[in-house]
Each structure stands twice: as structure tokens, then as C-alpha cells.
Amino acid sequence: MVDVASAQSENDNLRKIRFRLLQWESKEDPIAGLTPKQEECMEKLASKWKKIRGEISDKTPLESLKEEKEQQQQCTYPLSKIFKDLESSGIKSTHDFLLWHDRVKGEIHENANSSYERYLQQLELRSEECRVMLQQVDTAMGMLNNLNSQYDFVSHKTSSLNTASQQLIDEQKKMQEINEEIQRRLQFFNQVELLYQRIQSPTLSVASESFRECLSKIDDCIKYLQQNPNYKDSSAFIVKYKHILSKAIALIKNYVITVISQATHQTLAPKNVGTQDTKPNAEAAFALYYGKYQASAIKIKRVSQLVEDRLSFGAEYEQLLSDIHNNYLSERANIMSPAVESAIQDLKITYKGDQCSLMRSACGFLVHVCQDEHRLFFQYFSVPSDQLISYLEGLCTILYDTMRPMIIHVNHLETLAEICSILRIEMIEEQVQQNREQLEAFDRTANQMLQDVQERLVFRAHLYLQSDILHYNPSAGDLAYPEKLEMMESIALSLQEPTLRRSDSRSSLISTVSNTESVDTNYRTRNLNSPADLHGMWYPTVRRTLVCLSRLYRCVDRPIFQGLSQEALRLCIQSVSKAASKISSSKTSIDGELFEIKHLLILREQIAPFRVDFTVKETSLDFSKVKTAAFGLLQKRKQLFSMGSNNAILEFLLEGTPQIKEHLLDSRKEVDQQLKSACERFIKDAVQMLIGPLLIFLEKAQTLVSQAPTMSNKEQTTPSKFNYTLRQSSWASPQHISSIIQETQRLIKVKLCNLQRSMQLYLSNRDTEFIIFRPIRNNIISSFVKLEQILATNGYSQDDMIITSCPSAEQVSILLSSASILAAEAIVNFSGGRKISTSSNEGHSQRKISLEKKKIKQ
């Protein structure tokens, strides 16, 4: 029973062990996992087991181990089977297993190095093979070293041979270069005979390419020998080449002369054959004088280009080109000079008596000739020449010689001015400046003619100023003022619509000259109805002066114009003043003064467009000290030859030298001064005309007051006898003063209308009339104010003041305003040719006077 129980317990223990071994590394719930080392042992056991079973392969141990591991990973040997195998091997307990394990471990240890030993044997075999291979490599390296040394030897020998060969080649090349250089230098010496023979050949043509090549070789040889004078016989060969060059130049010159002579002969032949009476038209003349030459230009152009390209090679070519130019221009002069002279003479006959048309046509003809000749010259040549300018100047001289006698016999300023405009504007500015190169010669001739015309114009202008301005003898019609203005005004009004009335803005001051050359045609007014503004109504000397200045302004130089304008304005002012004096003597001083003011205003306005300085500097000698020094010399006759500073002759020379003085004369200032003087005289006479009695009284009263003795302070506090002297005078009584004031007021009412009518008729400008009338008004008011002051300061009582009825400044202003309004209405009525009833006029005047009073009070 005990045995059975023990056996039963052992079986139970074994089952537990088996169960635990099965659960030891269970994938789901292992009791104890194997370490890597334990796994490796298990793999070894498995491999050992396979060997035991005859499954050992021929692979290396490492490969077998890897393969077994991979197989084991791929398919896990079930532990249950392992345990069954262990049970079949007699292992029934743990002790048996451990014994078996030790035994298997020993066997594995014994058989573990077998694969390594086999691998070691393989390594030793491979090592032997490598040793044999190294021996073969050493043998090959020795052979290569030997071969390398042999290569170095051969290479050294080859490079030495190459260097020697290269040296020989360089020396050969150098010798060839020397030989070529010698041959190149020798060719400049060896070509003498060849070039001489070619130049002497009768078949050689100047226009051929072979001649150009010969000429190029000659130039190259001469240039080379001149650059190397140290070569043997270089000077002798230069002489030979120069001789050949002279032959070539002679050929060129003969060729050109022949071609140009043929062209000249062909040009002149038709003229000799045809009739002399028939004149070719412009196109036929151009074809006649230029057709043959243009056909020959191609031949000459090729040769002239050959010469022009070689101008830098020597003076021979420059001289040759100059000779060719000279020959060409001489032939053209033989053709064109008679033709130009004949054409100008024909124009002179055609425009006989019309100097301006003749000058315009002749200059235009020469302009075309110069342009055609310049164009033809450059069809032959490319380089400009001074001889061309001289030739064209010769053609233009024909024009100058023909026109100058005509110029010096022209007397009319208009004609001379027109000729100046033709030469300056139409020819020089419009033609020459646009074609400066082609018309250089014509420019010189035109300027010379212009200077002659200007000189003649200045001369005739001086004579004109003296004869037609300074010494002008006016006719009765020239001095018929204001009748002439009234007549012109009535004519102008009769030509207008009945409803139109003369405007107040007419002005001789506003008239302008749009072009200074046409003052007498372009004068305009602010409106078209003022007869005083018409230039035909100007005094003749004023009109002539302005016309003369307008003609001279664009025709002469500015300094000359300034001098002429100074003289013209001075003489014109004298002429106007003389005419004003005659009008004043024949009519009234007011008419003369207004006439002078009117024309001085016209002068001042019309000279404004001239953009010049009217100031002229005059230089004179002052001999005032010479007279004093001469008297001193006579008084010191004993000291004539004394030594030192007391020498009378020396003092006379030092002190008696004339002094140079400069004076600035301004024509505009002279016009302004004369205008100011005329306005002052007019204002004075106008005031005298309006308040003459009052002025006489004021003069007498002021004279008497100025003669009064100075009073002491005590005398000033008490009435003085002298204070009543003016009051007690019969001519200064209140009644007499009242009559003077009434007479003055009557004169203002009567005369002011005529005065303003005259101002409006002469001046025709509201602003000018107002400017001149304002000082008249102020003088009248101030005269009444002086009268009031004299009455107040010279013992007149309040009753006396009432008796005199002396108006105040405001009352005088109202009086003048009312009189001016009445005068303006009278002028309007007269100008409009209408009659207005007196009652309506008076009512209208009263309304305007009341308005004036209100303005003054305000």
C-alpha cells in the first residue's frame, strides 16, 4: 500500500512537473519565461537532437545555427512532444533530466568547435592562396618597375630629340621671317622700273583700277622711304618715285582738263550756233548751262575722289586738287560770268523804274545761281574749297556793280526802306540763314549792299528831317484847328446810324501800331468814330516823323536808329511847338495848347513800340579853362622861360587843357518835359479864362497883404488900422467883391462848356480829359478858398461875408459839377444833332446837381 501510495504520489508529482513544464513558457500565460541564454541552450539541444537523428547538414556551423534558429522560429517544436521523447529516453524525474542534461551538454561542448575547425581549415587554405597571390604581385611589380625605368629613359631621349627639333623649326621660321622682311623691304626698291613702265604705258587710263593701284604703290613706297631715311640709297629712290608721281599727276591733270574743256565746249557750242535774239526759258537755260557738266561729273568724280583720298600723303596732291579746282572754276567763270551779267541786265531792263522788284529778282536769281553752282561743284568734288567762295563772290560782284549805282541814286525813303527789308529779311534771314554753306558768298555781297542802302537811307533821312520836318511850311489847312476836327466829326456823324452816338472812350492815346513798319496804315482807335484819332488828321510833321521812324526801325542798326530818332523827335517837337504858336496867334491860346498836347501825346504813344533806348550820349569839349589859362599866360609873360614850377608855359599846358564832357540826351524825357510844359500852360490859361476876374483880385489883395508891416503881440490883440485897409479899399468893398464873384460864376457857366468841348474835340479821351481837367478844378476851388481866407482874416464882418456871397469849397465843387454836366449834355446834343427842350434840360440838370450835393455831403 505504501508502495502504491508512493508510486501514486510520484505520478502526481510527475504530472505536476509536466503540467508546470507545459505552462512554463506558454504563449498565453507562461509561468516563467526563458532568458535568451536559455533559449539558445534550447536551440542547441534541439540541434543536438537533430544530429542525433541524422539531420545534420553540410552547412557551416554559423549557417546551420542561423538556419536552425529560423526553422525554429518558423515552426516551434511542441514541448509536449519533447517531453514525450524525454519519457521515452528513460527520463522520469528531474534528477534524470538534469543528468541527461549534463550529458547532452558535454556532448554539445565536445562537438561545438567542429564547425569552427572546419572554418579554420578553410581560412588557412585561403591564406595560402593569398600568399601565393602576393608573391605573383611582387613579381609583377618588379617587372613594372623595370618597364617604368625603361619608359623614363625612352621619354627623356624623345623629349631631347623634340627640343632639338623645335629649336631647328624656330630657327627655320626666323630665317623665313627675315627673308620675308628683306623681300618686303626690297619691294619698295624693286618697283621703280615696273611702276615707271606702267605709268608710261599708252594704254593706261586714269580712271582705271590699275592706275589707282599704281598710285597707291607709289604713295606707299615714298612714305616708307621717307620713314626710313637711313636705308642705303633711300634718298635716290625717293627722287625716282617723286618723278614717277609727277608723271601720274600730269596724267590726272591732263585728263581733268580735257574732260572739263569738252564740257565747256559742248555748253558754249549751242549758244554760238543759235540766234542771239531768242532767250531760253528757265528750264532750257538750266539744261544748257548745267546739263553737259552734270554728264561729265561722273568721270571727274572718280578721279577727284582718288586725289582727295590722298591729301594726307603729301603737298603734291593738295596742289593737284587746287589746280583741278582752279581749272574747273575758271571754265565755269568763262561760262557763267557773261550769262549772269546778261541776265541781270535783262532784269534791269524788265524792271526799269521799279528798284524794289529789280533788287528782289536780281538777288533771287543770284541765290539760285549760287545754289546751283555749289551743288554742281560737289557733284565733281567732295572737299570744299576757298576758290569756290571766291568764284561765287565774283558772280555776286556783278550784281553789286550793277545795283550800287542804282542804290546811290534812290531818293525816296520808302524805296530805300523796302530795299533794306528785301535784303535783310527776304534774302539774309530767309535765304542765307537756311543755306549758310551754299550762300556764304552771296551773304557777303548782300551785307555789303545792305550797308550801302543803310548809308543812303541814313543820308536821305537826315535831309528829309531837315527839309520836311524842321523847315516845313504849313498851309492854312494844316493849321485849321479846330475847324478841321469839327468838319471831320460832322462827316463821321453823318455816316453813322441816327441812333448811334459818339462814345466817350475815343482816344488818340489808345491807338496802337501793330507793326512799326506801317504806322500810317494800321492806326486804330478804341472805337471807330473819333476824327481826332485818324492819322490823317495828325499834323503832317508828326505823321512824317512817325512814318520815317517806322521805316528806319527795321532797316538800320540800333545805334544808328537811336541817333536818328533823337534828332527826328527833337525836330518834330520844334515843329509842333511852332505850329501851336501859330494856331494860338490866329485862334486862341487854348486851341494852340490843346493842339500841342494832342500831338505830343501821339508822339509819346507811338514811339513806345520801338524797343530801343532813346538816350544818346554826346561828347563835347569844354574850352572855358583855356581862356583863363591864356589870360594867366599873358599876365606871367616874365615867367615864360623860368625854371621850376613857376614856368608860365607849363602852367598854361596843364591848366588850359580842354575838358571832355559827356551829355545824355533822352528823347522820351524831352517829349515828356515838353508835354508837361504844354499841360501847365493850358491849365494856367484855362483857369485864367474861367476865373480871370477872381485871380486879378486875389493877386492885388495878396500884394497888398504882403506889404503890411509886422505887428507886435499887443497890436495883434487890438484892431489895427491896417487890418481895415483892404476892407476900406474901393476895389475891395463887399459889393465889388460880390460882383467879381458873380462875374466869375458866370464865366464858369459860360466858358466851361466851350473848354470841355475843345478838350473833347482835341483829346477824344475821357480819361485824358479828366486828368487834365482835375488840376483846373482844384485851382478854381483853391482860388475861392483863398478868397474866403482873405475875407476872414482882413476885417470883413459877417454882414460883409453875406454881401459878398463867397461860395465855399463844396459849393464851388457843385457849381463846377453842374457846369460840367451841362457842358457834357450840350456836347452830346451837338454830336447827336438833336435839339432838346430847355425845360427838360434844366430839370435833368437840377436832378444831377442834387445828386452831386448828396455825394459831397456824404
Image (tube, rainbow, N blue to C red):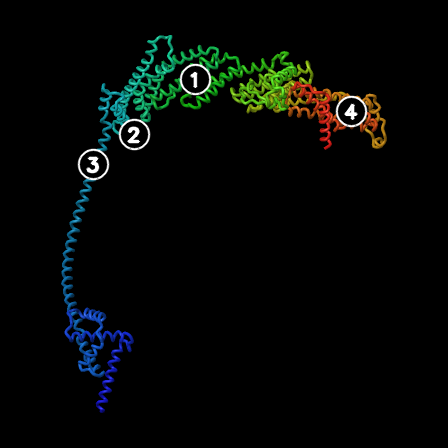
Label 1: few (<14), some (14–19) or many (≥20) C-alpha neighbours in 10 Å: some
> Picture coordinates of residue 657 (x, y %)?
60, 21
Tell me the kind of residue under disc 2: Gln
Question: Disc number at residue 175?
Answer: 3
Q: CA distance from mark 1 to mark 3?
A: 73 Å
For this orientation, the residue located farthest to the bottom is 1
Q: Give the number of the mark in front: 1 or 3.
A: 1
Tell me the kind of residue under disc 4: Gln
Q: Which residue is mark 4?
A: 702
Q: Give the number of the mark in front: 1 or 4.
A: 1
Contact between labelled residues 2 and 1, with CB atoms less than 8 Å apart: no
Q: Give the number of the mark in front: 4 or 3.
A: 4
Tell me the kind of residue under disc 1: Gly
Label 4: few (<14), some (14–19) or many (≥20) C-alpha neighbours in 10 Å: few
> Picture coordinates of residue 480 (x, y %)?
65, 14
For this view, does 390 lie left or right of residue 695?
left
At x 21% / y 90%, what residue is drawn?
3
Whichever of labels 2 and 4 marks the residue nearer the N terminus, that label is 2
Tell me the kind of residue under disc 3: Met
Q: Which residue is mark 1?
A: 364
For this view, does 767 lie left or right of residue 176?
right
> Picture coordinates of residue 819 (x, y %)?
72, 23
